[in-house]
Amino acid sequence: MALLEIRNISRSFGAFTAVKDVSFDVSSGEFFTLLGPSGCGKTTILRMIAGFDLPDAGQILLDGRDLVATPAERRPIHTVFQSYALFPHLTVGQNVAFPLRMAGVNETELRRRVADTLEQVHLAELAEHYPHEISGGQKQRVALARGLVNRPRLLLLDEPLGALDLKLREEMQLELIKLQREVGVTFVFVTHAQPEALALSHRIAVMNQGRIEQLDEPSRLYSFPKNRFVADFIGNCNLLEAGVVEGQDGLLRLQAAGLGEILAPAREDVNVGDKGVLALRPEQVRIGAADALPPPFPKGGGGDFATPDDPGASENPPQPPFGKGGGNSFPGTVRDFLYVGDVTTYQVTLDNGQELAALRANDAPGRARFFEVGDRVTVSWAWDAGHFVRD
Amino acid sequence: MRGTLFETDKFPPPPLCKRGEKGTRWAITAPPTLFLLAFFLAPALIVVLASFQYPGEFGGLAPLLDAGDGREHGLTLENYQFFFSDFLFTEILLRSFLVAAASTLICLLLAYPVAWLIAKSPRQHRDFLVLLVILPFASNFLIRVYAWMIILGPQAALARLLNGVLGAFGLEPVSLLFSPFAVLVGMVYVHLPFMILPLYTNLEKHDPVLLDAAQDLGANAWQRFWRVTWPLSLPGVFSGSALVFIPVLGMFAIPDILGGTRDMLIGNLIKDQFLGVRDWPFGATLSIVLTLCVLSLAGLAAWAGRRRRGEQ
């Protein structure tokens, strides 16, 4: 049985519907994330689980028991707030001891558990300090320690890393994963930062306008977005408008706006005539100089999937997609590029007007980029790289 | 070419203190400093000196130097000896402290919920509610105190009702006016805004998420108040208490108007020394004793506050 069951909950504020008929389960020991843009209803759901707000309809079950009638202070659920909400008049140690005092834990036991928990978040030496005397990252740890000290059934985390700078945030991500594994408490995490969600979670519910758009493991969300919103929201994505012309044996022939026919794998039930987008990640798009021959994926090479470092493939090629044609390779011009150190993203305008982002690792020594604005290039992708998303 | 980037000697470090900054600082701070020296410190020292002098024949002070006419002159400890010679003075002092403490406590109990309600009300209403709190200041203090004479007077509804009830139980009628009760009512009424305002200023700043956090961590409504709201409001409680306690301690108008003959407080006593008995040195002595008491009390409070924080 799932630890937490959310069954068809809805919540409106006046005319605004924050949460519309949302259901999901969270298993014991899971790191579950609600991901979505601000105003998508994720924080409202968190507040309802914590007990600060009640659903207009639906049930929230913990261990199979309905929580709706239980006030927040009696739910075995703690929250780590975005602003940390540490008590400014109490020391770090007293902050961590707070939930134990409320639970009436005796003094010896309390001291031991506070010390243990502070040890776990590497703050033992700061126990006597006041919150205003410690750094943002340390406050974050105190908030975590305070939320975990009396082992709640569920720990809710409301954008807890949002206030930290990038470097610290990455450190805390690793530490969160480690801590969650150590204490074995189930985490429900709320964030609008998709890299954070991908890095931390066992499963992610992508939310938009009060509904769950898709609920899946991070890698599946990234590779197989269910719809245009998820494709666009998770990571960077080229979205090519396309309609299905033909489909057979797990292959789709698409008519893409401005690109003509392209090939894509079919991973769901898709019918001829369906409209949608081909979701193509920039790292799946190869970019090469127009005069360099041959391009990474030969023109018209629907039938040739071999890459130089994969000789086996040419001996035994996969099924030919509809014979010839459908080559996912197009000439274009570099319009702009974004250098971020390890990689450079090139914005390419194809000759037929379509914009496409292609990513290339800066793997050559001393190279910050391979192409300049205005360079003629060829972009291409493996026929099975994209993912067709039906509207 | 590299050198041009690192030619730091072209940009000498800025001076720590710009020329003229010091002059500006003096120009700004000198007038208030001089004002305080002239009109606060000097008079205070005169009062200290006066408390060691003899009274003049017709009020005022006897000269410090011998005028050659055989009258008292110079410095003396007689005023302080006189204060301790009669327990009556200490009793009045203690009673004043008691009245001040009671007024402060009652003000606190009344002001806290009011301040809390204002702080919790919608932001656009708060200024208006604060205005209501300070509205009484728009009318004269004495007029407002005299108004209480009418409210508490024997012909007023309040006294009639009370005495009616007492009479029904066969008890003697009482007078509300000219009683310690009336003094307390007046003190609380006049000083209540001084308690409400600092409390409101404090409570308004509280981050509501702290109460959410406390509830989330298992605190019920009562625990949320005692463990979060109350300790966080202590600075407001202390400043409000000081703003009520100290003026009440020196207040003479309210006991004069609303109190009976036996409700004399230290403020009345001091006023009488200067304006009635015309014994300025003893009036000064009483002022000094009162000031020392208040200062030691404040010191005690500060020490207790620091100790409490240290122990936690």
Image: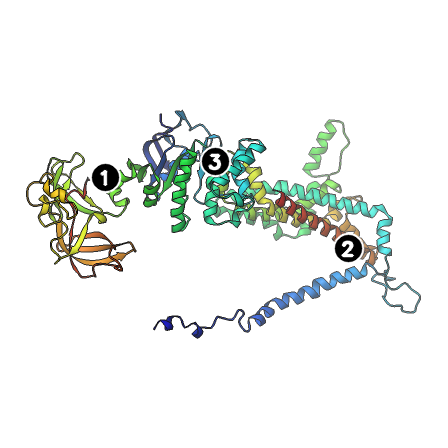
Residues at marks 1 and 3 touching, judged by CB atoms closer than 8 Å: no
Q: Mark 2 points at which residue?
A: B288
Residue B226 position within the rendered picture, expressed as x and y whole percent measured from the top left: 58, 38
In the figure, A247 relative to B126: above or below? above
Alpha-carbon neighbours of circle 3 within 10 Å: few (<14), some, or many (≥20)? many
In the figure, B30 relative to A212: above or below? below
Residue B196 position within the rendered picture, expressed as x and y whole percent measured from the top left: 60, 46
| Discs 2 and 3 carry the same chain letter | yes
Q: Mark 1 points at which residue?
A: A224
Residue A357 position within the rendered picture, expressed as x and y whole percent measured from the top left: 21, 52
- At label 1, the amino acid type is Phe
Please identify, in this view, whether the residue under mark 1 or under mark 3 is nearer the observer.
Answer: 1
Q: Name the residue under label 3.
A: B216
Q: How many labels does the image show?
A: 3
Gap between marks 1 and 3 measured at Cα: 37 Å
Alpha-carbon neighbours of circle 1 within 10 Å: few (<14), some, or many (≥20)? some
The answer to whether B286 appears left or right of A129 in the picture is: right
**Secondary structure category for the residue under label 1:** loop
The answer to whether B63 appears left or right of B302 in the picture is: right
**Secondary structure category for the residue under label 2:** helix
Callout 2: chain: B
What residue is shown at x 24% (from left), y 59% (from top)?
Answer: A369
In the figure, A308 relative to B163: above or below? below
| Discs 2 and 1 carry the same chain letter | no
Picture quadrant where residue A333 is located = bottom left
